[in-house]
Image: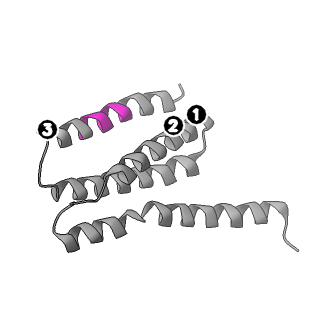
């Protein structure tokens, strides 16, 4: 019927699509934030946990040399970061320089990742 390679490709492509859809689930939280006009009783924890998980999976993909894993989790990390920035923009009490610290942490992580990813 199907070869093993064809089955692997189909399952891999489906996993890729559904993983990105899963990462985009933060849209629902952002919609609630917009409807309420603030974060009120909502927690940023799903976005923070999502950023950590995607970062760790990204690192794993870099170590394994798996470009699909790196690509999917790069998208996931960016989505989680955008959701977190959106969430933060609606918070009433803002911690000074928290966004600057977050962006700096992301930049430092990229400096650590990309030189390690290159093989000379």
Q: Residues within 10 Å of mark 3 (few under 14, many from 20)?
A: few
Q: Residue at x 63, y 64 (%)?
A: 13
Q: Is residue 87 above or below residue 56?
A: below
Q: Secondary structure at mark 1?
A: helix
Counting residues from the N terminus, which is met first, the one under dot 3 or under dot 1?
Answer: 1
Magenta segment, principal secondary structure? helix
Disc 1 target residue:
63
Indicate whether 51 appears above or below 37: above
Q: Is residue 100 magenta?
A: no
Which residue carries the number 2 mark? Answer: 59
Q: Secondary structure at mark 3?
A: loop
Residue 111 falls in image quadrant: top left
Q: Quadrant of the N terminus?
A: bottom right
Residue ID at (26%, 59%): 41
Q: Quadrant of residue 43?
A: bottom left
Question: Where is mark 3, residue-wise?
Answer: 97
Secondary structure state at the residue bearing disc 2? helix
Type of colouring: one colour
Q: Which residue is farthest top?
A: 120
Foreground pick, 90 / 74: 90
Distance, label 3 to label 2, CA atoms, is 27 Å
The Cα atoms of the two marked residues, 1 and 2, are separated by: 6 Å
Q: Which x, y percent locates residue 30?
A: 29, 66
Residue density around tag 1, few if under 14, some if 14–19, many if 20 or more, within 10 Å? few
Which residues, given as a range, are shown in magenta? 103-110
Q: Position of residue 36 (x, y in %)?
A: 20, 71
Q: Position of residue 102 (x, y in %)?
A: 25, 39
**Mark 2 surroundings: few (<14), some (14-19) or many (≥20) residues within 10 A:** many
| Nearer-N-terminus badge (3/2) | 2
| Whether label 1 touches label 2, CB < 8 Å | yes
Count of marks overlaid on the render: 3
Q: Quadrant of residue 29?
A: bottom left
């Amino acid at each position: 019927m199907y070869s093993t390679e064809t089955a692997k490709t189909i399952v891999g492509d489906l996993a890729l699509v559904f993983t990105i859809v899963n990462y985009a689930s933060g849209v629902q939280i952002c919609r609630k934030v917009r409807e309420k006009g603030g974060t009120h009783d909502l927690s940023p924890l799903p976005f923070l946990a999502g950023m950590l998980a995607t970062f760790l999976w990204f690192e794993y993909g870099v170590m394994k040399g798996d470009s699909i894993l790196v690509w999917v989790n790069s998208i996931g990390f960016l989505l989680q970061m955008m959701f977190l920035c959106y969430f933060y923009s609606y918070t009433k009490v803002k911690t000074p320089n928290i966004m600057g610290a977050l962006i700096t942490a992301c930049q430092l992580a990229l400096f650590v990742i990309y030189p390690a990813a290159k093989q000379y």
